[in-house]
Amino acid sequence: LGVLAAVALARKRWAALGHDPDEIGAMALWAVPAGLIGARLYHVLTDYQRYEGRWGATVQIWNGGLGIPGGLLAGTIVAVWYARRHDMPLDELVDATIPTIPLAQAIGRLGNWFNQELFGRPTRLPWGLEIDATNRPRGFETFATFHPTFLYEALWNLALCALLLWLDRRRLLPRGSLLWVYVGGYFTGRLWIEALRIDPASLILGVRVNIWVSLTAITVSGLMIILQVHKRRGVDGQPETTDSHKQR
């Protein structure tokens, strides 16, 4: 459902830029499977301990295990490859499609509610999520309600989608910059949400891997936005050449 919503919105936005909306559907046929494979590879690589001695289970995707960072990376690489191969302008493609990604993620997070998985630490807040005893992690058997971290992420992603659409409509950033706003915005949310989660995860220096990934992504995206804004200001501030003055 998330993919269908994202493709529908991207088709509409791509058509508004004067392009064939069917190009988006054709690209999705490549980018979506690539994202799925990338998400699985990320999960297996960052939680390889779960598969030691039973490597055949690494392909059993129906048993769960997808890492969004890997899916984003692989899906983006394949989308860029497809766009270049079919002469689709990358900057316009970014502006048309990037706001649709957090929309898809928000819808996809509903699966965590159905599966009673990837929730946070215990809480007594009114919106605390009731978890069946069989799905409570070891050491938390006596707690009944937990932080619905997937709900937090879904709401964060919907807000991020709205922000990206607003920025694009107001043209406040150079074309193509929405990619880095999305990366920084998503991983900022993931940073504090990840800190609430209690599901098993690989650690580096006692810190969850996804927190390190989030910090890295936030830093890189911030630098890229600064560079792109500085580049546009440099271009806008260039003095007119003699030729352009004569043409006027």
Image: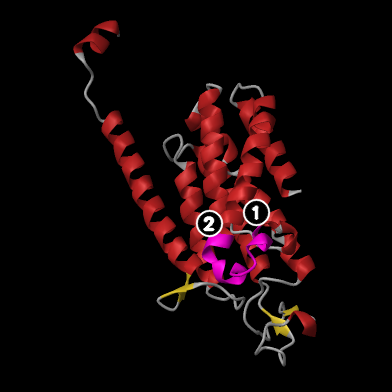
Name the amino acid, label 1. Answer: Gln
- Up-down relation of residue 86 to residue 67 (above or below): above
Identified at 67% across, 86% down, the residue is: 138
Viewer-side residue, 52 vs 204? 52
Magenta region, residue range:
44-58
- Confirm whether residue 160 shows in the render: no
Viewer-side residue, 63 vs 235? 63
Identified at 68% across, 66% down, the residue is: 151
Q: Name the quadrant of the C terminus.
A: top left
Name the amino acid, label 2. Answer: Tyr
Q: Is residue 110 left or right of residue 23?
A: right
Residue at disc 1, secondary structure: helix
- Up-down relation of residue 212 to residue 168 (above or below): below
Identified at 64% across, 36% down, the residue is: 30
- Up-down relation of residue 116 to residue 40 (above or below): below
Residue receiving disc 2: 186
| Residue at the outermost front position | 53
Q: Position of residue 16 (x, y in %)?
A: 63, 27
Residue receiving disc 1: 105
Q: Position of residue 229 (x, y in %)?
A: 34, 41
Q: Are marks 2 and 1 in contact (CB under 8 Å)?
A: yes
Residue 43 position by quadrant:
bottom right
Identified at 58% across, 69% down, the residue is: 52
Other residues around mark 2 within 10 Å, as few (<14) / some (14–19) / many (≥20): many
